Amino acid sequence: MKFFDFNFKKIKDFLNSLTEVLLVLVSASLLLGIIFGPETAFVGQVYTNFVAILDMIGQQGLIALVSLIIIFSILKK
């Protein structure tokens, strides 16, 4: 049956590609939010939400920032 011939490698490759694109989009949004400020359309909302998450997690977001750097470095491998 051709229906059950499911290829998980293609799904995994697609999800890996999607994750890479989304990481670049979020990184660029954060960078533009830092440069142009939180009043910028779309980019400002990403920056504002990111800062709110960092403030919510740790003291001034420092612990959260270190955690995110570690997570991103693991994803990079």
Image (cartoon, grey):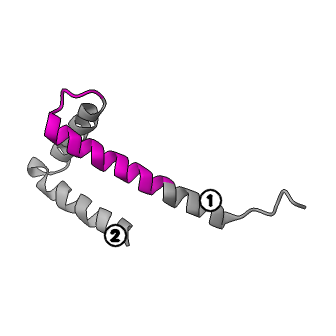
Q: On residue 19, which mark appears?
A: none
Q: On residue 11, which mark appears?
A: 1
When asked about the image quadrant of residue 9, the answer is bottom right
Residue 21 sits inside the magenta stretch? yes
The image position of residue 28, as x and y in percent, is 29, 46
The image position of residue 11, as x and y in percent, is 62, 59
Q: Amino acid at mark 2?
A: Ile
The span picked out in magenta is 18-41
Secondary structure beneath disc 2? helix
The image position of residue 44, as x and y in percent, is 23, 32
Residue at x 37% of width, y 53% of height? 23
Is 24 placed left or right of 33 in the picture? right
Q: CA distance from mark 1 to mark 2?
A: 21 Å
- Spot the residue most to the bottom: 77
Tell how many labels.
2
For the question of whether residue 64 can be seen, the reply is yes
Residue at x 82% of width, y 60% of height? 4
Name the chief secondary structure element in magenta: helix
Residue at x 90% of width, y 61% of height? 1
63 shown above or below 77: above
- Spot the residue most to the right: 1
Residue on which disc 2 sits: 74
